[in-house]
Image (spheres, rainbow, N blue to C red):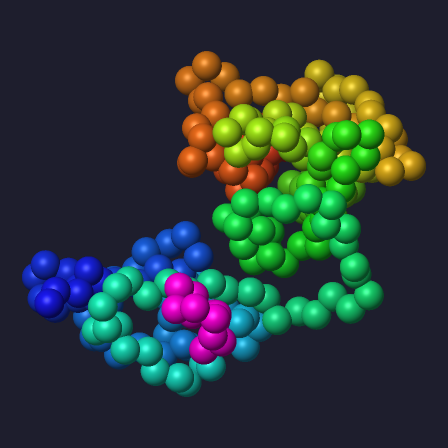
């Protein structure tokens, strides 16, 4: 029987960490080595979780994994930081891919429903240098048919402005959760349409970061 985690040349083995694939020359590897390859350093600050085998299992730094077993081993990483006291609202459930991404981000987040509008709220989201603040609270509006339908625009609090004094265009305001949020009207172009099954909160935040960076250049 062939193992689908084994390369055709017979000398390399594959595994996956979060969304990235890796190849090694030996079927035996430690948790420490996996975290280093995935760029999760210092390794003491991260949890490594083996998934896809029923109950998720935490892998210690010096524990050895046998990649020669059938199937591609899949791992998830989480920061060890404890956020005591934060009990985020979970008014609706996101796809597992989004939940895993948000948990791995190390940021506090929650899902809320207010006035039939569903939102994902992310706290202390970092913004590039050149703005009046270094981080904001941000929310994304989620349609009832998501992820088949797109996420559009983003909203921040407090309102962002450029230290250069230049004007940011296409802004508006919206009231939510007792605060006035700044709406950034940024939309996908025709060559960058929403791709169901591919696009998600992670890819939308990549566009958000691109928009924020473009304003300060």
Q: Nearer the viewer, residue 174 or 133?
A: 174
Name the residue rendered at 56%, 40% in the picture: 201
Quadrant in the picture for the C terminus: top right
Q: Is residue 79 left or right of residue 195?
A: right
Reply above or below: 63 against 127: below
Residue at the far left: name it. Answer: 9
Q: Nearer the viewer, residue 80 or 148?
A: 148
Residue 128 appears in view? yes
Q: Position of residue 71 (x, y in %)?
A: 26, 64
Q: In this view, does 124 lie to the left or right of 27?
A: right
Q: Where is residue 105 in the image (x, y as percent from the top left)?
A: 59, 54
Q: Nearer the viewer, residue 121 or 93?
A: 93
Q: Position of residue 162 (x, y in %)?
A: 75, 30
Quadrant in the picture for the N terminus: bottom left
Q: Quadrant of residue 111?
A: top right
Residue 161 appears in view? no
Residue at the far bottom: name it. Answer: 62
Q: Does the magenta stretch include residue 83?
A: no
Name the residue rendered at 45%, 30% in the picture: 196
Mark count: 0
Q: Quadrant of residue 211?
A: top right
Reply above or below: 7 against 185: below
Reply above or below: 160 against 7: above
Name the residue rendered at 61%, 25% in the picture: 152
Reply above or below: 79 against 28: above
Q: Does the magenta stretch include residue 58?
A: yes
Q: In this view, does 103 lie to the left or right of 52?
A: right
Residue at the far front: name it. Answer: 54
Q: Where is residue 164 in the image (x, y as percent from the top left)?
A: 74, 28
Name the residue rendered at 87%, 38% in the picture: 177
Specify the segment rendered in magenta: 48-59
């Amino acid at each position: 029987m062939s193992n689908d985690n084994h390369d055709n040349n017979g000398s390399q083995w594959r595994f996956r960490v979060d969304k990235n694939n890796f190849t090694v020359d030996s079927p035996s590897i430690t948790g420490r080595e996996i975290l280093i390859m995935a760029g999760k350093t210092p390794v003491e600050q991260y949890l490594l979780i083996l998934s896809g085998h029923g109950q998720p299992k935490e892998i210690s730094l010096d524990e050895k994994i046998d990649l020669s077993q059938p199937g591609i081993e899949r791992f998830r990483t989480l920061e060890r930081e404890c956020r005591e006291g934060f009990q985020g609202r979970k008014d609706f459930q996101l796809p597992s891919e989004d939940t895993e991404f948000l948990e791995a981000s190390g940021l506090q987040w929650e899902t809320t429903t207010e006035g039939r509008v569903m939102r994902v709220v992310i706290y202390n989201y970092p913004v590039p240098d050149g703005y009046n603040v270094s981080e904001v609270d941000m929310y994304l509006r989620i349609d009832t048919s998501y992820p088949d339908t797109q996420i559009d625009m983003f909203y921040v609090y407090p309102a962002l402005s450029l230290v250069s004094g230049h004007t940011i265009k296409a802004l508006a305001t919206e009231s939510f959760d007792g605060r006035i949020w700044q709406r950034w009207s940024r939309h996908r172009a025709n060559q960058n349409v929403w791709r169901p099954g591919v696009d998600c909160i992670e890819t939308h935040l990549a566009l958000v970061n691109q928009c924020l960076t473009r304003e300060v250049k």
